[in-house]
Image (cartoon, helix red, strand yellow):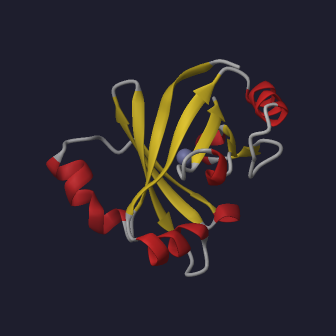
Amino acid sequence: MKILKIDHIGIAVSSIDEKKNFWIDALGLQLEGKETVEEQKVTTAFLPVGESEVELLESTSKDGPIAKYIEKRGEGIQHVAFRVENIEQALAELKEKGIALIDQTPRIGAGGAKIAFLHPKATSGVLVELCER
Ligand code: ZN
């Protein structure tokens, strides 16, 4: 499998609009797009930083995964996403190496990317996302 770069860092926030004073106004990052993925009960905002991006994640519902994450651990870095050349091949290879996966097959995430999460027990507690665009 080939990892091309850190695609983005996912940051859980209570409210994108309320927290953009730091990310956009203070840091001067540009908001590239905002999108709601209903299936995952999340609204995402992508802020490009050079070759990578910051992805702000806001829950659309009290029982969504991001709401639960914030309830348990507070706002902060929620996942790190690596861009891979071929996500199906990467998942098959990791499975073969005995790495626990949350997603056995890719699903469609924000921006139409193919994404899959690895299980944090296999990754020193870091939620790792693979994505292919
Ligand atoms: Zn992500």
Residue 32 lies, with reference to residue 11, above or below; the image says: above
36 lies left or right of 99: left
Q: Quadrant of residue 60?
A: bottom right
Report the quarter where the N terminus lies: top right
66, 58: nearer the viewer: 66
Which residue is at a point 82% across and 36% down the rendered structure image? 95
Numbered marks: total = 0
In the rendered view, would you say 49 is above or below 104?
above
Q: Is residue 111 left or right of residue 58?
A: right
> Residue 19: x percent and y percent?
28, 63
Q: Residue at x 48, y 75 (%)?
A: 72
For this rendering, which residue is in front, 35 or 130? 130
Seen from this angle, which residue lies furthest left?
Answer: 26
**Quarter in which the C terminus is drawn:** top right
- Image coordinates of residue 123 in percent, x first then y, are 59, 44
Q: Residue furthest bottom?
A: 62
Q: Is residue 1 left or right of residue 105?
A: left
Q: Residue at x 68, y 46 (%)?
A: 118
The residue located at (37%, 69%) in the rendering is 15
* In the image, residue 93 above or below residue 13: above
The part of the image, by quadrant, that contains residue 112 is top right
Q: Residue 129: horizontal and vertical position, in percent?
A: 61, 42
